[in-house]
């Protein structure tokens, strides 16, 4: 991935932004640490700002010894520390918040994570209103609307620059299919749409090289509840961190490629979407073409079969409630 990046950086140098500051909020956590390492290895990142309520300077000191050119700084958990971490950032990744334990749904994290994400969004609206905000903290279906409401309240909302990170769902789908088919996952591009929890995650196998998989209920369930496998295996010690760090780094890399002039960069992501607004669903994950302004184009979902039609109906019901819950939270707790 990074070798290709280096070549593309040169190829697009005419229009490239030469300085790309990336901030990670929650950088000392299970996702934050490997994510920071992967970002340090990415030659497109010139400055890495690491913030957490505890431990960010230590992580920064450690990562800063990796011999790539970018500078790394850890920030103290004070308002000015956070503001300085964010100032000038082009991309902000937010994996701050608590992870699930066995038996919990992502929605069970809402009470703790909603206020964490709201407060970090306030800081972003204040210090880097034009940055691309990539929300990893769960429940993504609600935390992304929370960020939107915070930005709207301050008059700086740009729907093209707010992203819920759903990359892990397509990473899992391609890996699970490759295991069944004995293929290279790099050749398995599976479209996954909807949201990021349980039945709101809708894989569209009918659009893949293996359309017959759309009737494979076990596989569909595995993609929708893949996160549970990790939560169960970690047995109380958290949820996916390493695969998530890889997915988050991929999403950040795609945004940087697009902002540096590369055309046709497409990633699945949960954005303010026109696709189902007429049904009251303001945010939806689908393939999105990225560009220098963030979201360039939200691509249509495309043709789905009868099984997937049903999956979408179930998705809409839950997703609508999750989005509404996020909006109401900010209305009641601005
Ligand atoms: P973790 O507990 O290991 O790390 C979270 C970090 O956030 C900690 O270091 C903590 O100190 C920090 N933090 C808490 N409040 C903060 C604040 N106000 N400001 C800055 N930092 C703060 O958890 P984790 O395993 O890294 O997971 C983080 C979140 O990511 C969870 O909500 C989890 O559900 C979510 N997640 C999302 C996806 C996805 O696909 N979008 C995948 C995996 C995990
Ligand atoms: C995942 O999909 O792994 C994350 O959303 C974490 C979780 O709670 O499952």
Image (cartoon, rainbow, N blue to C red):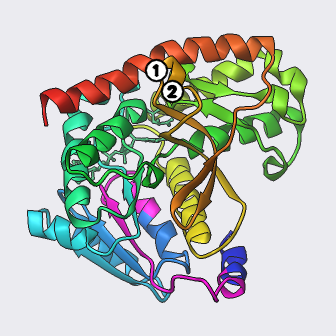
Identify the secondary structure beneath mark 1: loop
In the rendered view, would you say 39 is above or below 234? below
Please tell me how many numbered marks the rendered image carries.
2
> Residue at left 56%, top 81%?
43
Query: Would you identify the image quadrant in which residue 178 lies?
Result: top right
Query: CB under 8 Å between callouts 2 and 1?
Result: yes
Q: Is residue 233 left or right of residue 8?
A: left
Residue segment shown in magenta: 9-35
Q: Is the CB of mark 2 within 8 Å of ligand 1?
A: no
- Residue beneath label 1, please? 280
Q: Position of residue 35 (x, y in %)?
A: 45, 61
In the rendered view, would you say 110 is above or below 292? above
> Residue at left 66%, top 41%?
170
| In the foreground, 261 or 214 | 261
Badge 2: how crowded within 10 Å, few (<14), some, or many (20+)?
A: few
Q: Is residue 248 left or right of residue 333?
A: right
Check residue 277 in the rendering and tell me which mark sits there, or answer none.
2
| In the foreground, 118 or 73 | 118
> Residue at left 58%, top 83%?
16
Cα–Cα span, label 2 and label 1: 5 Å
Q: Position of residue 268 (x, y in %)?
A: 62, 44
Q: Is residue 237 visible?
A: no
Badge 1: how crowded within 10 Å, few (<14), some, or many (20+)?
A: few
Check residue 86 in the rendering and tell me which mark sits there, or answer none.
none
Query: Would you identify the image quadrant in which residue 112 lies?
Result: top left
Q: Is residue 140 left or right of residue 42?
A: left
Q: Is residue 250 visible?
A: yes
Identify the secondary structure beneath mark 2: helix
| In the foreground, 236 or 148 | 148
> Residue at left 28%, top 43%?
97
In the rendered view, would you say 30 is above or below 40? above
């Amino acid at each position: 991935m990074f070798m290709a990046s280096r070549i593309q950086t040169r190829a697009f140098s005419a229009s490239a932004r030469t300085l790309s500051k990336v901030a990670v909020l929650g950088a000392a956590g299970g996702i934050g640490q490997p994510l920071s390492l992967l970002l340090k290895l990415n030659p497109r990142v010139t400055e890495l700002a690491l913030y957490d309520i505890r431990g960010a300077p230590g992580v920064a000191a450690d990562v800063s010894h990796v011999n790539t050119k970018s500078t790394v700084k850890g920030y103290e958990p004070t308002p000015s520390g956070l503001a300085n971490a964010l100032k000038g950032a082009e991309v902000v990744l937010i994996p701050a918040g608590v992870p699930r334990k066995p038996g919990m749904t992502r929605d069970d994290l809402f009470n703790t994570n909603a206020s964490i994400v709201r407060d970090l969004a306030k800081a972003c609206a204040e210090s880097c209103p034009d940055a691309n905000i990539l929300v990893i903290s769960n429940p993504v279906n609600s935390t992304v609307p929370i960020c939107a409401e915070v930005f709207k309240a301050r008059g700086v909302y740009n729907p093209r620059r707010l992203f819920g990170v759903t990359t892990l769902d397509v990473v899992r789908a391609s890996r699970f299919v490759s295991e069944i088919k004995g293929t290279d996952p790099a050749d398995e591009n599976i479209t996954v749409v909807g949201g990021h929890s349980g039945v709101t995650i809708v894989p569209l196998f009918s659009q893949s090289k293996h359309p017959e998989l759309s009737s494979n209920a076990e596989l569909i369930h595995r993609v929708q509840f893949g996160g549970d496998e990790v939560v169960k295996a970690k047995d109380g010690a958290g949820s996916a961190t390493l695969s998530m760090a890889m997915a988050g780094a991929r999403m950040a890399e795609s945004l940087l490629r697009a902002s540096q002039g590369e055309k046709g960069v497409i990633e699945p992501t949960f954005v303010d979407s026109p696709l189902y607004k007429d049904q009251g669903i303001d945010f939806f994950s689908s393939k999105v073409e990225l560009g220098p302004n963030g979201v360039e184009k939200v691509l249509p979902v495309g043709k789905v079969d009868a099984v997937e039609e049903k999956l979408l109906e179930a998705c809409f019901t839950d997703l609508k409630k999750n989005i509404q819950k996020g909006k109401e939270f900010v209305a009641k707790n601005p």
